[in-house]
Amino acid sequence: MSRRSVLRGIGGASLSLPWLESVNAQSSAEQSPLRMVHYYVPIGVVRRGFFPGESDHVIPAGNLGNVMQSLGKQDPKFSDRPLDVLTPTMQPLESIKDKVSLITGMDRTFQAGTDVHAQCASCYLSSAKPYEVQGTAWPLDRTLDHLVADVIGKQTPFRTLEFSCNSHKDNKESIYFDNISWYGTGHLAPSIRDPRKMYRRLFSANENEAFRDITSLVLEDARSLNRELGYSDRQKFAEYFDSMRAIENQINRLEALRSSLAKVDFQEPTESHLPRGEYIRLMGDLMVVALQSGLTNVATFMVGPERWDTPYLFESLFDKPRSHHQMSHNQTKMIEDLLRVDLFHMEQFAYIAEKLDRITSENGKSLLDNTLLTYGSGLGDGSTHQYNDLPIVIAGGGGRIRTGRHLNMPEGTPLANLWLTQSQLCGCDTPQFADSSGPITSLLNG
């Protein structure tokens, strides 16, 4: 049985298994494929909270209560140092600090002719040379996730999976503001935004039986298999099914909440009042299960759209829905609120990273160790709309990349250098990617 073996219940329901040593034909010592996930944050960050050395005064650390931190000045000419003290926005990564690298100094080139936000998301994983792609106002070409999937996605049921946490349906902006994954110029890889739809895509169920929990449908087969497993695998198996049940319960809870909210007369759309953190973490849980069970090795995860003024309920931060984009254009007056939003997005990233780190993969390492999990944004600063010095964090990749470091690239280093490095780590025979000038050798181990 392979790691992607499925249990099938009545009604056409199926559920993929995680890697289990007792039933897996592969040797646990076999080299594990390096997965790749990109977690995209819109509208940049507040620099003084994210970047070391950007502020010399005390900054409130939002959800961390009364924690305050003073950031000292930093030599801008350094290139490599330990990631010892985390900035306020990066504080949620403290527990996995040794598995994280901060990369600063990465730049993108803006192609004149469109709104500044239009290229932030759509061109983030493409980074094509300006004016090289004909017939488009965007320097947009086939994105990194699909190029890498040509190598590490051939044997998985889904070559790539595209997650989006934009639940709004008001179509405020064009598709270029709201998607980071593209098959090629003008050819969007559509993302899934509804947790129930993603659940059904991952774990197929006959529509006539859709009202029944998939985990319930396959429990009988599961119990039969469970008797054949060793102690360690039984523990993994139980944890996996508990996780699946928790996902189902959370989907049901959010759907019930959405139905209740639809009966209330709000000034904003109903979706604005859904708990933001719960929604993002639920989509994150679905992505983790897809990686754990071998349904895919490549995923993109978009936290929100660019320049979309429709508000969200950041439930742990504010008492009513707020627009991230509008706050970014009033940074002077709303600096503390924006810092809290940045911290909130990093907390969701840390939630996914920590969950991956608790799962043992087929080579005995954690699933995080076998994944390049990248946090990033298409803007370096949401207020000034700068395309240089982007906020980039990489978690995982243990043994293949250097972690626990802060790498500061020379001025003018293309973001495509990082994408070239990641594609080569994933096995792509790629001498150049977009406008890259070479791989980032200081990131590599050995």
Image (spheres, helix red, strand yellow):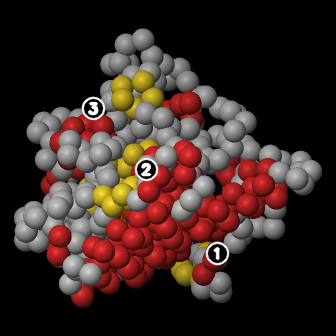
- In primary-sequence order, the first of circles 3 and 2 is 2
In the depicted view, which residue is nearer to us: 238 or 90?
238
Please report the residue visible at 53 percent of the width from the left and 66 percent of the height from the top: 247
- Secondary structure beneath dot 3 equals loop
Task: Report how far apart the C-alphas of labels 2 and 1 lie in the structure.
Answer: 47 Å
Task: Report how far apart the C-alphas of labels 3 and 2 lie in the structure.
Answer: 44 Å
Number of other residues with Cα within 10 Å of mark 2, as a class: few under 14, some 14 to 19, many 20 or more: some
Whether residue 381 appears in this view of the structure is: no
Number of other residues with Cα within 10 Å of mark 3, as a class: few under 14, some 14 to 19, many 20 or more: many
- Secondary structure beneath dot 1 equals helix
**Residue holding disc 3:** 434
Q: Please, which residue is most extreme toward the right here?
A: 265
Q: Please, which residue is most extreme toward the top here?
A: 135
The kind of residue on which mark 2 rests is: Gly
- Secondary structure beneath dot 2 equals helix
The numbered mark at residue 62 is: 1
The kind of residue on which mark 3 rests is: Ala
The numbered mark at residue 12 is: 2
Please report the residue visible at 25 percent of the width from the left and 37 percent of the height from the top: 147
Position of residue 140 measured from the top left corner of the image (x, y, whole percent): 40, 27
Q: Quadrant of residue 308?
A: top right
The kind of residue on which mark 1 rests is: Gly
In the depicted view, which residue is nearer to us: 315 or 330?
315
Q: Quadrant of residue 256?
A: bottom right
